[in-house]
Amino acid sequence: MIQAPAHSPAAAVEGLYVYCVVQGGDHRLFGPIGLDGQVVHTLGRGELRAVVHNCPAQPYQSRDPQAVEAWVLAHQNVVRAAGTAFGAVLPMAFDMIVRPGPGGGADETLEAWLNEKHEHLARLLAKVAGKAEFGVQVLWDRPVVAAKLLHDDPQLHALQDRAHVQPKG
């Protein structure tokens, strides 16, 4: 568990780091696969469960980019493990932490949220069931691509030639 500084009042307040929401009635213990090796488990009653670990009720922060990168990768790995175990998952943004509320601890706050949003979350889980998400990133060197397009397309080449001989304005 990450430790808040001893002088911080948040150090005594237990929160829950939420990775994702899944559908499945059984409690699951994933083991120490979370951020900083935290023990990850499911929490909730009924068919909806959140995949969580216990933590201080404060954001994960670091000036070390490698630490932040490790946290983000661990977050994604937990979501992936939950997907393998349960099928469909609704991933949460990095650093989603549930704090205790007026009605009880973080557990009760999270369970109340799952109950309140049950219909909506169940509908979203049904919508993503059997699907996968992929990110595609295209990096290109604009001058190189533009030169290639001009070389390969006679119409573009003619437009460029006309643009060079036209008066400005």
Image: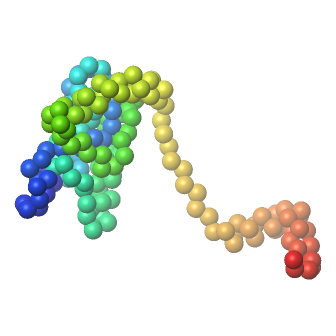
Instruction: In this rendered view, identify the residue nearer to me: 154 or 127.
Output: 127
Q: Is residue 25 left or right of residue 38?
A: right
Q: Nearer the viewer, residue 72 or 141?
A: 72
Instruction: Give the percent coordinates (x, y) of residue 47.
Output: 30, 20
Residue 1 point in image, percent of width and height: 14, 50
Q: Is residue 71 above or below residue 165?
A: above
Question: Residue visible at 67% across and 68% down?
Answer: 142
Q: Position of residue 132 (x, y in %)?
A: 48, 35
Mark yes or no: residue 130 visible: no
Q: How is the image coloured?
A: rainbow
Depicted 141 relative to depicted 58: above or below: below
Q: Residue at x 81, y 67 (%)?
A: 150
User: Relative to 22, is 162 above or below?
Assistant: below
Left or right, residue 127 beside residue 15: right
Q: How many marks?
A: 0
Position of the C terminus by quadrant: bottom right
Q: Residue at x 21, y 43 (%)?
A: 99
Nearer-the-camera pick, 157 or 21: 21
Camera-nearest residue between 164 and 10: 10
Q: Is residue 45 left or right of residue 127?
A: left
| Residue 145 visible in this rendered orientation of the protein | yes
Residue appearing at x 28%, y 41% in the figure: 18
- Residue 54, image x, y percentages: 17, 42
Taking the view exactly as shown, the residue that stands out farthest to the front is 102
